Image (cartoon, rainbow, N blue to C red):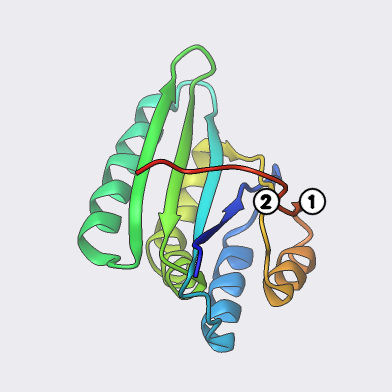
Amino acid sequence: MSESTLYIVVKHPTYGCKSAISLALYLNSKNMKTTDQNITVFYKWTAKPGKFDELKAIYNEVFREMKENEPGTLSMHYYSDDEQNALVVNDVFQDGTALGAHLGGTAANHFPKLVEIAVPGPFFFCGEVPEELKQAAIGMKMGAEFSHPVSGFSRS
């Protein structure tokens, strides 16, 4: 069986904490079976004026918590764009259950402070997105866009 990857990138300037928690609870309640499909999430946080150092400090804590408390998170990397006072984040989750656990845990815990000091987005979904996840994202009114895979490869 070949491994496929689902890419999620989020787009919404006023993405709210309740939405993240709702999606996490929705995913966990559905107990989505995506064991052979990793979910990769790309997104950006742009700090409000004077808040870039605080944004980086919060993400140092997010990184630590994900590494220590989320066994379903396969990788987490974040990159600094000093010219735009932004962080670009790349998370890879084992499956939908792991993503739901992250959104209901670490993400939900830090989201209220993050939206005070930074603007999130954008978000795009690329891959064979389960219909339940598509409907949850559409219901969150975050301007989600979906594309199916056409071609690609991965090297080990």
Mark 1 burial class by Cα count in 10 Å: few <14, some 14-19, many 20+: some
Mark toward the start of the polypeptide (1 vs 2): 2
User: Foreground residue, 148 or 56?
Assistant: 148
- Using the rendered image of the protein, determine whether residue 17 is visible from the camera's viewpoint: yes
> Which amino acid type corresponds to the residue marked 1 in the rendered image?
Gly
Disc ID at residue 23: none
Disc ID at residue 126: 2
Please identify the quarter of the rendering in which residue 52 is found.
top left
In the image, what residue occupies the spot 57% across and 61% down?
17
Q: In which quarter of the image is the C terminus?
A: top left
In the image, what residue occupies the spot 56% across and 81% down?
32
Q: Is residue 135 left or right of residue 55?
A: right
> Which amino acid type corresponds to the residue marked 2 in the rendered image?
Cys
In the image, what residue occupies the spot 30% across and 36% down?
57
Residue 147 rendering spot, x and y as whole percentages: 76, 51
In the image, what residue occupies the spot 66% across and 56% down?
127
Q: Which residue matches tag 1?
A: 143
